[in-house]
Structures are given as structure tokens and as C-alpha cells.
Image: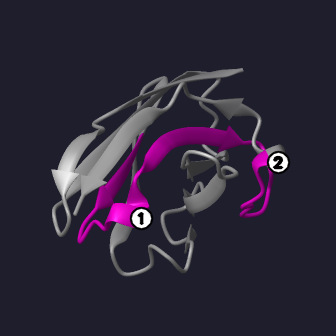
């Protein structure tokens, strides 16, 4: 099992930027798929971005493509997964969750992710 702790959320004006980080510990196997999801009030949790064991494998939701960038930093026994969010819009307001999947392929479905963080709130004002 992997333990995930998100940080970096907050309140920002439209057009601004935020950087979310997810500290992963435990069984941080290098071949995990790391993802970011978000859930707005009254809506289902949706895929935002994912990165594989190789930085060449990245995937973004169409709604964030060109504005968000996912990255991963590996260290001994830990992994940090970052989400740089630029040109933020009010519709980006949500609780953002970090997740880890043992899948061998890039996945965007919540049910295919095995471990989840507690979430961090991002609020974008207009």
C-alpha cells in the first residue's frame, strides 16, 4: 500500500497559478501510474492528469491540456508527484486528489487506482 499526502491547494484568482504536490511513501514501486483527479461539489470525481514510470508517458484531460503539467520526482523510498496549474479558471474549482495505480498501462478510471490521498481544496475566484 502507498500513502499519499497532497499539499498546495488554496484560493487564487482566475488566470492565476497553483502548484499541487503529492508526497508518496510506502511501497513506491517505480512502475506505478500516478494520477491527479478532482471532484467539484455535486459532481463525480474526474480524471485530470497521469504520469507513468517513464516521464515520456503522460496523459491529460482535454479540459486541462495546455494549462496543467504533471511531473514526478523520485527519491529513495519516496516519490513526489506535482501538478502545475496555470491559467486557472473558476471551473477548475474542486477538491484535487492524488492517486496511485498498479496498472501496467496508463489509466484514467477511478476504479483502476488503488491508493488515494485525502484531497486538497482548490478554489478559483472570478
Is 100 inside the magenta-drawn segment? Answer: yes
The answer to whether 15 appears left or right of 85 in the picture is: left
Q: Where does the image place residue 20, in percent across and percent down from the top left?
A: 33, 44
Residue assigned mark 2: 112
Between discs 2 and 1, the one toward the N terminus: 1
Residue 2, numbered label: none
Identify the residue under disc 1: 91
Distance from label 2 to label 1 (Cα)? Answer: 25 Å
Quadrant into which the N terminus falls: top right
Mark 2 neighbour density, 10 Å: few (under 14) some (14–19) many (20 or more) = some
Q: Residue at x 56, y 45 (%)?
A: 41
Answer few, some or many: residues within 10 Å of disc 1's Cα (few below 14, many 20 plus, some between 14 and 19).
Answer: few
Q: Position of residue 124 (x, y in %)?
A: 28, 55
Placement of 25 over or under 72, stated as above or below: above
Q: Secondary structure at mark 2?
A: helix
User: In the image, is residue 3 above or below residue 84?
Assistant: above
Position of 38 relative to 69 (above/below)? above
User: Helix, strand, or loop for circle 1?
Assistant: helix
Q: Which residues are magenta?
A: 81-110
Q: Position of residue 66 (x, y in %)?
A: 36, 81
Picture quadrant of residue 68: bottom left
- In the rendered image of this protein, does residue 30 appear above or below residue 54? above
Is 46 positioned to the left or the right of 71 in the image? Answer: right
In magenta segment, residue 33: no
* Residue 122 spot, x, y in % from top left: 35, 44
Q: Is residue 74 left or right of residue 9?
A: right
Q: How is the image coloured?
A: one colour
Amino acid at each position: 500500500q502507498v500513502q499519499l499526502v497532497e499539499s498546495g491547494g488554496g484560493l487564487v484568482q482566475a488566470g492565476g497559478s497553483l502548484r499541487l504536490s503529492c508526497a508518496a511513501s510506502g511501497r513506491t514501486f517505480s512502475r506505478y501510474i500516478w494520477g491527479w483527479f478532482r471532484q467539484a461539489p455535486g459532481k463525480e470525481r474526474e480524471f485530470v492528469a497521469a504520469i507513468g514510470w517513464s516521464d515520456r508517458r503522460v496523459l491529460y484531460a482535454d479540459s486541462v491540456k495546455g494549462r496543467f503539467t504533471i511531473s514526478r520526482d523520485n527519491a529513495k523510498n519516496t516519490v513526489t508527484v506535482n501538478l502545475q496549474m496555470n491559467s486557472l479558471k473558476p471551473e477548475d474549482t474542486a477538491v484535487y486528489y492524488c492517486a496511485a495505480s498498479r496498472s501496467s498501462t496508463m489509466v484514467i478510471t477511478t476504479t483502476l487506482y488503488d491508493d488515494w490521498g485525502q484531497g486538497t481544496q482548490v478554489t478559483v475566484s472570478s
